[in-house]
Amino acid sequence: MFGSIPGDVEAILMRPAQAVSDFLERPAIRSLRFVAFYHLPFLILLPLFVLISPYRLILGGSFSKRDVFGLPTVLILGFLCLGAVFDRMQRYTRAGGIDPERPDYFEMRPDGKNLSLYLHIPVSASVFLFFFHPALGYLGLMATAVFSVYQSIVAWARLREETILRSLSIYVLSAGLLMLPLLGLMVLYNLLKTFRILREIYA
């Protein structure tokens, strides 16, 4: 499985339609296992590339936890989470909606499992560019992210035989659902901060 990753990256970037067709013929695996096999190795290598980067060695500088759990890791994980939610939304709406009360709900196997996660492999693979320069790494990461998001929207539109606009709307909805927990945490943080200020005023 690991040996197919370079070929997958090349196929996704050069022949995305053919790459999607070939991927849909593979047996489906669990999403967490898919991430562990196809994306986690790159996330593990990212701190190593930062550590041995000639750019960092020439300019000097320390190596800290921020280099391990820094912005590149957060961005990659963010795009992967969004891709996973988008896959789930597309698959379950294609199967007739999200309804856990249905007897066959958890046995449904609509086509396209992990399709968006597959098309996001180049995003994770962009960590190699951080070896050369941080700016090049961020540029490559964002460029592959835009490409992968677009290809995911197009691939699901073709698979479901719907318009790209409809697929895009589901992607936006997926982003909104993913932001709900973050929004809740922000509201909670502001409430706690307000309560602390009021307590200091009336103490």
Image (cartoon, rainbow, N blue to C red):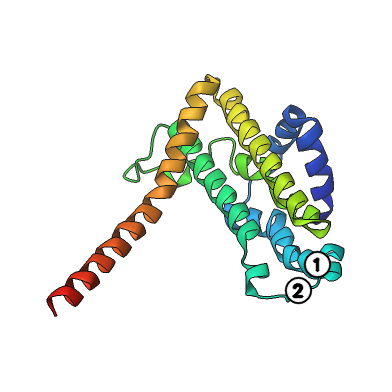
Q: Are marks 1 and 2 in contact (CB under 8 Å)?
A: yes
Q: Amino acid at mark 1?
A: Arg
Instruction: Choose top left, top right, bottom left or bottom right for residue 189.
Output: bottom left
Q: State left or right for residue 191 relative to residue 90.
A: left
Q: State left or right for residue 91 relative to residue 181.
A: right
Residue in view at x 75 percent, y 34 percent:
19
Residue in view at x 80 percent, y 67 percent:
56
12, above or below 132, in the image: above
Label 2: which secondary element:
loop
Residue in view at x 51 percent, y 27 percent:
167
Q: Which residue is mark 2?
A: 61
Q: Position of residue 24 (x, y in %)?
A: 68, 35
Residue located farthest toward the bottom when viewing the structure as drawn? 203
Residue 111 visible in rendering: yes
Q: Which mark is residue 125?
A: none
Q: Which residue is mark 1?
A: 56
Q: Position of residue 119 (x, y in %)?
A: 67, 40
Camera-side residue of 106 and 89: 89
Please report whichever mark, 1 or 2, sits nearer to the chain's N-terminal start. 1
Neighbourhood count class around disc 1 (C-alpha, 10 Å): few under 14, some 14–19, many 20 upward:
some
Q: CA distance from mark 1 to mark 2?
A: 7 Å
Q: Amino acid at mark 2?
A: Gly
Residue 1 visible in rendering: no
Residue located farthest toward the left when viewing the structure as drawn? 202
Q: Position of residue 152 (x, y in %)?
A: 61, 34
Q: Position of residue 200 (x, y in %)?
A: 20, 76
Work out which quarter of the rendered image holds the C terminus and state it.
bottom left
54, above or below 19, in the image: below
